[in-house]
Image (tube, helix red, strand yellow):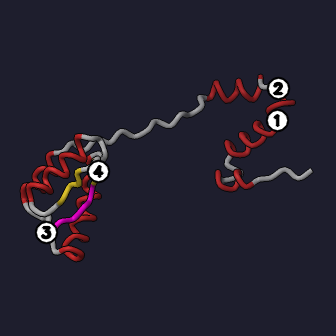
Amino acid sequence: MNINLLSLGASPVRLMNSQNQHLYYILLIKTNILNSAGLWSKYSMLKTTLPVKSNVDITHSKLKTFMKKQPVVYKPKKVQVFSRHEVTKFISEAPDEKFLMIKVAFLIGLSGACRGEELQKCQLKI
């Protein structure tokens, strides 16, 4: 059974045997379409969908071995945090004419008087 899952230019990739399935996953990695976490997600989705829709089994051992060998690279993003010195400098040196509302919101958030979600919903009524 031929299943068009990915089309690169004029030649579609068809997953009808284990070799083509293996090549499909190699192609996804080499072209940087998916990282290893996304690859497992795609594998899980196809593993549950293909047997139901098209009677194709992708649970062969070569593909699982290949998937396990792929490095799992997780790089968390570093959150930028103001230092105590930067906070005191901003509050004391920033001009009130321009930054008063930001200073007030900053102090309310810093003191814990409002949650971030509540702070976003605050509105100025004049």
Nearer the camera: disc 3 or disc 4 = 3
Provide the residue designation for mark 3.
57
Would you place residue 78 above or below residue 1 in this image? above
Left or right: residue 33 versus residue 97 is: left
- In front: label 1 or label 4: 4
Per the rendered image, the range of residues in magenta is: 1-6
**Place of residue 87 in the rendered image (x, y in percent of width and height, measured from the top left):** 67, 29
Amino acid under label 2?
Pro
Cβ atoms under marks 2 and 1 closer than 8 Å: no
Disc 2 residue crowd, few under 14, some 14–19, many 20+, Cα 10 Å: few
Q: Find disc 1 in the rendering and name its residue.
A: 100
Q: Is residue 114 above or below residue 98?
A: below
* Image spot of residue 64 (x, y percent): 12, 56
Mark found first going from the N terminus, 3 or 4 = 4
Q: Which residue is drawn at 28% across and 53% down?
A: 7
Return the residue nearer the eye: 11 or 44. 11
Label 1: few (<14), some or many (≥20) within 10 Å? few
| Numbered disc in front, either 3 or 2 | 3
Which label number is shown at residue 37? Answer: 4
Task: Judge by depth and name the residue closer to the eye, 77 or 67.
Answer: 67
Q: Residue furthest bottom?
A: 52
Q: How far apart are marks 2 and 1 (CA)?
A: 8 Å
**Looking at the picture, how far across and down is residue 20, in whole percent?**
12, 55
Quick one: 30 or 102, which is closer to the camera?
Answer: 30
Q: Along the polypeptide, which appears first: circle 1 or circle 3? A: 3
Q: Earlier in the sequence, mark 1 or mark 4?
A: 4
